[in-house]
Image: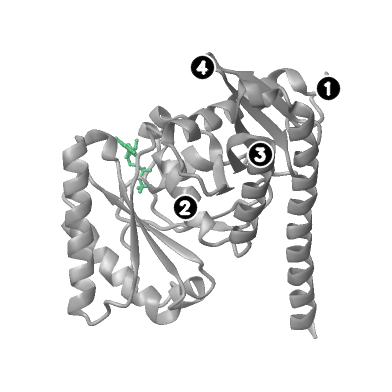
Amino acid sequence: MGLRRSGKSSIQKVVFHKMSPNETLFLESTNKICREDVSNSSFVNFQIWDFPGQIDFFDPTFDYEMIFRGTGALIFVIDSQDDYMEALARLHLTVTRAYKVNPDINFEIFIHKVDGLSDDHKIETQRDIHQRANDDLADAALEKIHLSFYLTSIYDHSIFEAFSKVVQKLIPQLPTLENLLNIFISNSGIEKAFLFDVVSKIYIATDSTPVDMQTYELCCDMIDVVIDISCIYGLKDDGTGTPYDKESMAIIKLNNTTVLYLKEVTKFLALVCFVREESFERKGLIDYNFHCFRKAIQEVFEVRMKVVRSRKHQSHM
Ligand code: GDP
């Protein structure tokens, strides 16, 4: 959610539809509630509800209770290049309404379009928005509501990074995934590994070493290269087949003695690793460990599918 022209549609198009940031200049502003399912093409089984800026909570035709009840995270976009007082008032109203319906929602505030701000200005804006939003909650005796803030822009990878963090909070198996990644990298001499949702380039988990933005950007670029080349040259002559399948893998050697290694894990997920050249000489070991890792990941999600299915079954009874 967010005010008109804050950048909601652009974010959605750039993250989930590979639109280039410059093309968003010609997007029409959102003026009706749009709902989009991204569960068919992506690991992340969620819906995006793009709300026009000014929804009227008092409009009886708009059933916000129904929407908020089933919501895991509410992302509120604030245009940092504009005067944000109105946005803050709107944020407060939205958060308090949503919290009443569903106190388990994660509130995620994207302080957006920060590409136009200097580094100092960015920090100052974040501090100011953080302070005002929390003061408003305190004035309403709702300081127990927790808001998370992110500085984002569609012109760099910050929007993907922020979305990754938002999505990770909604994955109940995250600690298991992190644990598996830790075991995998420490036994294979790998520096860093990310588990990516290929379509959106959201990383759903990484090992517990710190994330360095440059490393993350390189991994995103690698996914783009692999998928683009596959789409152009990897499909059959009649255009059938998929650009990403069980056989998908790629190795890119960089000029700083690092190797990027990508491998398919599931239909939607890929593992991208950073490996030193000398460690990559033991590729047999890495591949063997990867084989075990992949099996474990599939088991984790099989358990989840079974749980979901049995829940559905119970609710039908
Ligand atoms: P919506 O009404 O909230 O859906 O807003 P739009 O997605 O239509 O975006 C409004 C304008 O903001 C467009 O011209 C976008 O190109 C621009 N915009 C969106 N994100 C960014 C960003 O990260 N940086 C900059 N500088 N402009 C952005």
- The residue beneath circle 4 is 256
Task: Nearest to the eye among marks 2 and 3: give it.
Answer: 3
Q: Secondary structure at mark 3?
A: strand
Disc 3 versus disc 1: distance between alpha carbons?
29 Å
Camera-side residue of 78 and 280: 280
Q: Looking at the picture, which amino acid does disc 1 mark?
A: Asp
Q: Looking at the picture, which amino acid does disc 2 mark?
A: Lys
- The residue beneath circle 1 is 238
Q: In the rendered structure, which disc, 3 or 1, sits on the residue that comes first in sequence?
A: 1
Residue 285, picture quadrant? top right
Q: Looking at the picture, which amino acid does disc 4 mark?
A: Asn
Task: Nearest to the eye among marks 3 and 4: give it.
Answer: 4
Task: Nearest to the eye among marks 1 and 2: give it.
Answer: 2
Residue lying at 24% horizontally and 74% vertically, measured from the top left: 137
**Can you see residue 257?**
yes
Most distant residue in the bottom direction: 317
Camera-side residue of 176 and 89: 176
> Is 91 rendered above or below residue 231?
below
Q: Which mark is residue 271?
A: 3
Instruction: Kindly check if marks 4 and 1 are in contact, taking CB atoms under 8 A apart as contact.
Output: no
Disc 3 versus disc 4: distance between alpha carbons?
21 Å
Q: Secondary structure at mark 2?
A: helix
Camera-side residue of 269 and 76: 269
